[in-house]
Image (cartoon, rainbow, N blue to C red):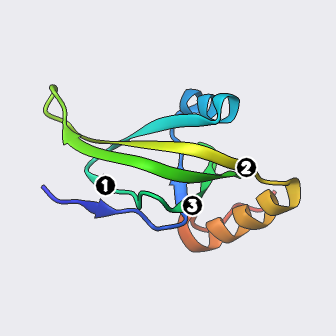
Amino acid sequence: MGFQTEFNSVCKFKSEQELYELLEYGRGKMVKQGLRVFPTGQKVIAYTPDNVAIAIVKIVGCIAEINFQNQEVTEVEMILERKLTEEESRIQTKLAYEMFFGEQTKN
């Protein structure tokens, strides 16, 4: 058992519902598998499940635990700072593919 540190500028949603709640209500949370450390108080770029940069969020809480099913999970609570413009999203998405997600396939 050990903690995995998340890169400080990435907050990738795996669930469309969690992303929708954040964008709709300005607050939200996401659940990640494994014990992870998210930097509380830091602003990060949020990405859709399809790896598209969508918003700037502020991490306001991070709880890592072993749940009742004996699974290691981390809940990350955040508030929406603002949505990215189309140009910001395009640039951040390209940078993320180069740095984190791997090369983007050419269409």
Amino acid type assigned to the residue bearing label 3 in the image:
Lys
Pick the front one: 23 or 79? 79
Residue 13 image position (x, y, % from top left): 53, 43
- The numbered dot on residue 16 is none
- Residue designated by label 3: 43
Q: Could you tell me which residue is drawn at 12 percent across and 55 percent down?
A: 1
**Numbered marks: total:** 3
Q: Residues within 10 Å of mark 1 (few under 14, many from 20)?
A: many
Amino acid type assigned to the residue bearing label 1 in the image:
Arg
- Answer with left or right where residue 98 lies relative to residue 2: right
- Answer with left or right where residue 45 lies relative to residue 29: right
Q: Secondary structure at mark 1?
A: strand
Q: Residues within 10 Å of mark 3 (few under 14, many from 20)?
A: many
Q: Quadrant of residue 74?
A: top left
Residue 12 image position (x, y, % from top left): 53, 50
Q: Residues within 10 Å of mark 2 (few under 14, many from 20)?
A: few
CA gap, disc 1 and disc 3 = 17 Å
- Answer with left or right where residue 35 lies relative to residue 80: left
Closest to the camera, between mark 1 and mark 3, is 3
Q: Could you tell me which residue is drawn at 63 percent across and 73 percent down?
A: 98
Q: Quadrant of residue 6?
A: bottom left
Closest to the camera, between mark 1 and mark 2, is 2
- Residue designated by label 1: 36
CA gap, disc 3 and disc 2 = 11 Å
Which badge, 3 or 2, comes first in the chain's sequence? Answer: 3
Residue 9 image position (x, y, % from top left): 55, 66
Q: CB atoms at circles 1 and 2 under 8 Å apart?
A: no
Q: Secondary structure at mark 3?
A: strand
- Residue designated by label 2: 82
Relative to 81, say whether 7 is above or below: below
Q: Could you tell me which residue is drawn at 57 percent across and 60 percent down?
A: 44
